[in-house]
Amino acid sequence: MILPSPAALSSATFDRVDTWVFDLDNTLYPAQHDLWGQIDARMKAYISNLLGIAPEEAFRIQKDYYRRYGTSLRGLMIEHGVEPAAFLAHVHDVDLSTLDASPRLAAAIEALPGQKLVYTNGSERHARNVLEKLGMDAHFTAVHDIVAAEFHPKPTEEAYERFLRAHGVEATRAAMFEDLARNLEVPHRLGMVTVLVVPPGQTVAARESWEFEGREDAYVNHVTEDLAGFLETVARDLPPPLPADPE
């Protein structure tokens, strides 16, 4: 995949954006921190204990549900009647010491004009804990989590429509930042500018093969391996705000 250099980035498609929407895990922090690896392991253990099956079979079911239903939780709710609160509390009980504050990214997000939102298939508590550790909690107007979505996860169109209604967002004036290409297809169709965030350099994130699908598709407007640098360039090249009307 060839990435555009920050210097060559055209911000024309961002001129109308007044709402900036960010996924959380592996988007606002690099995948190599492997926080998601902890969550993955806890999901596997939860499913293994719940169904009384070997960890290997639990992992297979976990990933099958993730692909088919958008989240493993959604599949467990539909197939096994799992109570979501207990699941979320268990899988997000992770060690955040692997995360460091990200002042450059925090400053780049703060500099964007308009409101900034986190939209995650995880829980708000997990998102707030991560944002606080990264030093950027104060820069986001709200976190839209899986509970607010009434457990309808990305990438379903219903999930995005719920999100837009809940926060009064006009899709054609919004940008969406994600680490999974499939989660950008519906936002693009609704009129959002889409940005895929990928691991830097030769770093390889632990992924299922299908998670790489769609990276070259037309619904991905931009790709970056340096989110802070990308946002700095966008903010720098945006036109200045119009002067306020005199009283």
Image (spheres, rainbow, N blue to C red):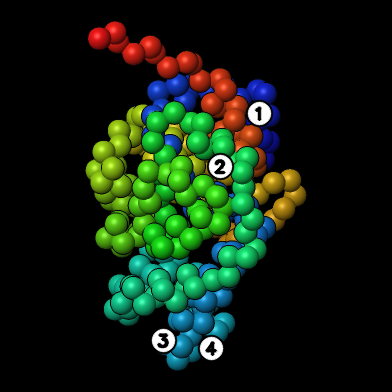
Q: Can you tell which of label 1 and label 2 is closer to the viewer?
A: 2
The residue under label 2 is 106
Q: Position of residue 139 (x, y in %)?
A: 46, 42
* Horizontal side, residue 98 vs residue 181: left or right: right
Q: Earlier in the sequence, mark 1 or mark 3?
A: 1
Q: Can you tell which of label 3 and label 4 is closer to the viewer?
A: 3
Instruction: Please tell me whether mark 4 sits on a helix, a strand or a loop.
Output: loop
Q: Amino acid at mark 4?
A: Ala
The residue under label 4 is 54
* Horizontal side, residue 105 vs residue 123: left or right: right
Instruction: Please tell me whether mark 3 sits on a helix, a strand or a loop.
Output: helix
Disc 3: CA contacts within 10 A as few (<14), some (14-19) or many (>=20)? few
Return the residue nearer the eye: 122 or 56.
122
Q: Amino acid at mark 2?
A: Ala
The residue under label 3 is 50
Q: Earlier in the sequence, mark 1 or mark 4?
A: 1
Q: Can you tell which of label 2 and label 3 is closer to the viewer?
A: 2
Above or below for 11 versus 181: above
Disc 2: CA contacts within 10 A as few (<14), some (14-19) or many (>=20)? some
* Horizontal side, residue 66 vs residue 201: left or right: left
Location of the N terminus (image quadrant): top right
Q: Quadrant of residue 80?
A: bottom left
The residue under label 1 is 6
Q: Amino acid at mark 1?
A: Pro
Q: CA distance from mark 1 to mark 4?
A: 47 Å
Return the residue nearer the eye: 218 or 140.
140
Label ID, residue 180: none
